[in-house]
Amino acid sequence: MTVKNVLDSATTVGVIGAGAWGTALANVAARTGRSVALWARRAEQVAELTNLRENRRYLADIRLADTVAPTADLARAADNDLVLLVVPAQSLRSVAAELRVHVRGGATLISCAKGIERDTLMLPTQVLAEEIPEGRPAVLSGPSFASDVASGLPTAVTVAASSLEHARCIGAALASATFRIYHSDDVAGVEIGGAAKNVMAIAAGIAAGRGLGASAGAALVARSFAELRRLGKAFGARPETLMGLSGLGDLILTAGSPQSRNFALGHAIGSGLPLPDVLAEGAFTARGLLALAAQHNVDMPIASAVEAVLSGRASPDHAVELLLDRPLRAEN
Ligand SMILES: NC(=O)c1ccc[n+]([C@@H]2O[C@H](COP(=O)([O-])OP(=O)(O)OC[C@H]3O[C@@H](n4cnc5c(N)ncnc54)[C@H](O)[C@@H]3O)[C@@H](O)[C@H]2O)c1
Ligand SMILES: O=P(O)(O)OC[C@H](O)CO
């Protein structure tokens, strides 16, 4: 498919994964007047989506747009010009491997996951390129809670692809009045921002759960951003990407809101409450993030503290002590 096709009004859209974000993005695509196939892996979920026109488990109280067709048939959702992959980062490879036989040559494959594959330390678009070499990978990321987006509240995200023109066309095809899409060719920068902010949001949640106060919270966000920026730089990410929607923007949203599942996980850990049964991608990303940082000789003390707490090697209080005990240094 040429880039021009992506802009065509006849462009068709498939969404793989009917969790909160997949359901919200299916509605977003439907707003552009397109028919959308939404794939869920469980037949019961497809039946519920079809009959109730609502995703009660993952995105309650939001009506599924009339032009969204739920399906359990992977081929039906994969055989489209634009395919959005909206499953957890650690499941992306297995889903992509199943998808490959059904995907059109040259189809645009948009990763909407935020994370790093634990076993390989690969970013989602790298996983897609490896599993579906016939496709054209891209990433969609930025500050965007599924419920806000699905409710039609104003949101801005970034789509990145190796060709800026490709990213622009994707943005033009999926944007609507309240869903603003910026485009970029800094794929690694956008993906690193999305992956790292989840780990940092857990740190912010832990600090809030320990009652460390608003000043500590602000310091943590600023120093978390310094870590994110250092790692991004090592990957050749552009500063404007890291200071943009998928870096600083998403860090501010996620580290500052109890609505975030990553923040909520940290808060529960910090306050000693039962852990919420939700997908918190940062918990699966922390170790990989640190491994990537070590490979690039980048210091990430906050991410390291989060990983130590998650793996049970440090209590929240001990992790805070370790951060406060670090030698004083120049701010960079
Ligand atoms: N929810 C949001 O607000 C939001 C916003 C932006 C990005 N994201 C990202 O989108 C990704 C998905 O998050 P979500 O919020 O939709 O999660 P979710 O927990 O709401 O849903 C996850 C979905 O993936 C499916 N799934 C899990 N493992 C699977 C597998 N092996 N094969 C097939 N399907 C599988 C589940 O059945 C479920 O439908 C994450 O990487 C998340 O960081 C979420
Ligand atoms: O609920 P979280 O922490 O997974 O965050 C959702 C989105 O990534 C926010 O941009």
Image (tube, rainbow, N blue to C red):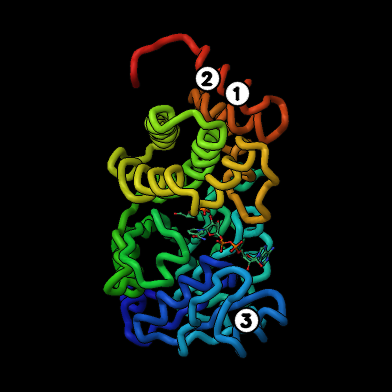
Q: Residue at x 43, y 35 (%)?
A: 228
User: Does 227 appear above or below 24?
Assistant: above
Of tags 3 and 2, the one toward the viewer is 2
Spatial separation of the CA atoms under disc 3 and disc 2:
49 Å
The residue at label 3 has a CB less than 8 Å from ligand 1: no
Q: Position of residue 94 (x, y in %)?
A: 68, 61
Spatial separation of the CA atoms under disc 1 and disc 2:
6 Å
Closest to the observer: 94 or 148? 148
Residue at image mark 1: 319
Amino acid type, residue under disc 2 in the picture: Leu
Please identify the quarter of the rendering in which residue 229 is found. Answer: top left
Q: Dot 1, how many residues are within 10 Å of its Cα: few (below 14), some (14-19), or many (20+)?
A: many
Q: Residue at x 71, y 33 (%)?
A: 311
Q: Which mark is residue 184?
A: none
Please identify the quarter of the rendering in which residue 18 is found. Answer: bottom right
Amino acid type, residue under disc 1 in the picture: Ala
Secondary structure at badge 1 equals helix
Residue at image mark 3: 75
- Determine the quadrant in which ligand 1 lies: bottom right
Which quarter of the figure is the C terminus placed in?
top left
Residue 107 seen in this snapshot? no
Residue at image mark 2: 323
CB contact under 8 Å: marks 1 and 2: yes
Mark 3 or mark 2, earlier in chain: 3
Amino acid type, residue under disc 3 in the picture: Ala
